[in-house]
Structures are given as structure tokens and as C-alpha cells.
Amino acid sequence: MKRAVWTILICAAVLLIAALATGYWARVPDSGTLRVGFLYSEDESTPYTANFVQAQRLLEETYGNRVEVHFCSNVLSRDAERPLRDLVRAGCRIIFINMDSDIPITVARDEPDVSFCQVSLPDVSIEGAPENYHTFNGEICQARYVSGVVAGLKLRQLLDEGTLRPDQALVGFVGANASAEVISGYTAFLLGIRSVAPEAVMRVRYTGSWGNYTAEKEATRRLIEAGCVIIAQHVNTSASAAACEEAVAAGRQVYHVGYHQSMMDIAPSCALVSLRTNWAPYMLQAVQAVLDGKTIEQAVTAHAHGRDLSAGFEAGWVELLELNRFLAAEGTEARVAREIEDMKKGRTKIFAGPYTGVNPRNAGDVIDLSDGFAENQNSSNPSFCYVLKDIITVEN
């Protein structure tokens, strides 16, 4: 009997020592700690997910031991269910999702006590989704337009100096696909450019993927070979910036406008500016809502479309990143400040002018922009899906 007692005591001691050595107790959250989950389509090696991780880390810094973060990276859309359920089993009460998948809606129905917050998608409607499913997105067309003004001022400088002829004011855009999200973005970018350099026209190449480094680099090279002097992107890697830097090293004159992160380190000889959606305001306020027992839509400062939220410069949801003062045209910084202030006050009509657009998926669907088009009125996901005649050419 004594031997059995000693055996039990020794085993308990061994388990206690093992627990202390492995930090088990440190992983058990204090009472009141909120477990927060993140489900990522990629990892920090891509600017897209790195931008989300930046918000995640700010969340951890802001709330300290009040939150405990769990995350899963490099998850394919079709494989989202298992990691989502793993995050729920880990005790996460709110989960942020940056991938293109309708699986979170299914899981949300089974887990009514967990808030699922997903970046809005063009083909996934919140209609019919459970009350604990939410979507959000930045009104990125605002930043696209202002980054276009930066590019337009550079084009204007080159044209006025005689470095370019008017017929050489060619702009290239590398996009993932012909979705409204991409079309809205490159249209806003070009209209920002043409507000300063009306000679500009655009050539677009699609890669067929959000994150294909090789395809993005090849598309950029083709646009440069076609004579484009400014390249912008709506894809997830830094390949386009790298291709532009290589072209400059080979003696070509080209400038780059990046997305998700600054490209200054990758393309110091040609990066003009970058833009990004700042996910932190939504995430911080959504977590606070859960901590306070409020609904997310009550707590987050944004434009509400039911349980779908969006915002722009006025709420810090979209940003222009570091301006390359060595390359930018004179007066760019002051002009950008004015443009952003106008955006905040709702004075700028982005999608407006003497333009006609055609829906590439339905040639009979035509829009006249003489009276303008208001983006993000009914959804945080962009809805402008028209390719402007005469000034935008899709090359594949």
C-alpha cells in the first residue's frame, strides 16, 4: 500500500516538473483572457498575409495578457473546415479569416457562441448567414485613386520634361483576375492618374491567381516590354516590384506602385509608393466588442451594410505607405495630403467622368460614368465591374 502511494506521489511530481519545464501553466490563460483565432490563406512571406499579421501583432501588443492568439497559416480554401474547428476547440471566441471560402459560414452555424469575421468576398453573401458571421473590408478604391494621383504627377513630370511623348503615357496593371475587386481597383488607380495626366491609358494583364510569384513577374515583364512606364498590382506577392527593379537595372525607365506593404526595400530604384488596407481598426474594435459583450456592429466605427462593415481614410482603414521622395514629382506630398483630406470629407467622386464601361462577363451590361458611380454603397466588397472603353485594354 505504501509502495502504491509513493508511486502515485512520484508520478505526480514528475508530471508537475514536466509541466513547469514545458511551460504548460504559462499556456493556460488567466480568468477573463479572450482567445482569438486567425486563419490565413498564406504566411508572412507574402505581403498580403504579412499585412494581416501586422494587425494581429498590434492586437497582441494592445491587449497584452487579456488575449491569447492562436493561428493557422497556408490553409487552402477547400481545406478550411478542419483548422477552423481546431481553433474553436482551442477555445477561440472570435476568429478572423482572410481567405476566399464559404466554409466559415457552415462552421459558424455549428458554433453560435463564436464570432467568425471574414474579409468580404464577391461570391459569398451575408444573406442567410448566421448572426455570428460577420464580414469586413477597407474601401480600398480611395487609396487606389490617391496612389494614382502620385503616379499621375510622376507621369506629368516626365511629359512636361519631354522625357515621354503623350502616346507613351502607358500604365500597366498586374491583377489576379477579372473580378470586381480587381477591376474597381485598377479603374480607380487610372482615374487618379488621369486627374493629373489625362493622356494616360492602361494595359492590364491577369495572372489567374492571387499569389503566383512566377506568373506575376512574367506579367510585369510583358507590360514593361509593351512600353508601360508605371506598373501597379493587385496580387499578393512582391514579384511585380522585383521585376520592375530588374528592368531599371537593365536600363529601362519604369516605376512601381505596390500593394499590402512598402516595396522600397525590394525596388528602391523604382518604388514610388504603396497602399494597403489597415485591418487593425476593425480587429481591435471587434475584439473589444466580444470582451464587452456587445455586437461587433455596435462597437466598430464604420459604414454598416448589415453585418458587413467597410471604411476608408476617415477611419484609418486604408492607407498610403511611405512615399519615395527621391523619385516622386515635386509637390506630391502636399497634393497627397489634400487628396486624402478630400476623401475623408467625401468631396471626391472617384468613378466619374466622360467614360463608358462594359462588363467583361456581359457585353450588354454597359455603364455611363457621366453621373458617377458610388462604390461600397451596399457592400464592403467592391462592385464596380466595368472595363472603361478606349483607355483600358485587357491583354489576356
Image: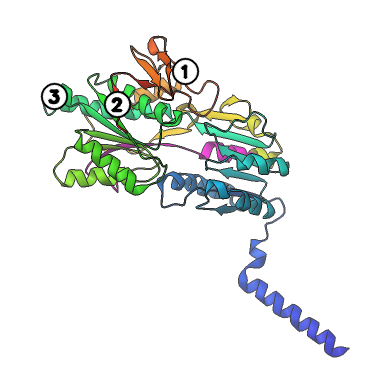
Direction left: furthest residue: 162
* Label 1 crowd bin: few (<14), some (14–19), many (20+), radius 10 Å: few
Report, in whole angstroms, how far the alpha carbon at label 1 lies from the one at label 3. 34 Å
Circles 2 and 3 in contact, beta carbons < 8 Å: no
The quadrant of the picture occupied by the N terminus is: bottom right
* Colour pattern of the rendering: rainbow
Vertical position of residue 89 compared to residue 113: above or below: below
The quadrant of the picture occupied by the C terminus is: top left
Q: Nearer the viewer, residue 92 or 347?
A: 92
- How far from the left and from the top, in percent, is residue 182? 41, 31
Amino acid carrying label 2: it is Thr
User: Residue at the location (62% across, 35% down)?
Assistant: 134
| SS at mark 3 in the image | loop
Badge 1 or badge 3: first in the primary sequence? 3
Vertical position of residue 165 compared to residue 118: above or below: above
Q: Quadrant of residue 194?
A: top left
**Along the horizontal axis of the image, is 251 left or right of 53?**
left
Residue identifier under label 2: 393
Can residue 68 be spotted in the picture? no
Residue identifier under label 1: 374
Find the magenta span and give its range: 263-288
Circles 1 and 2 in contact, beta carbons < 8 Å: no
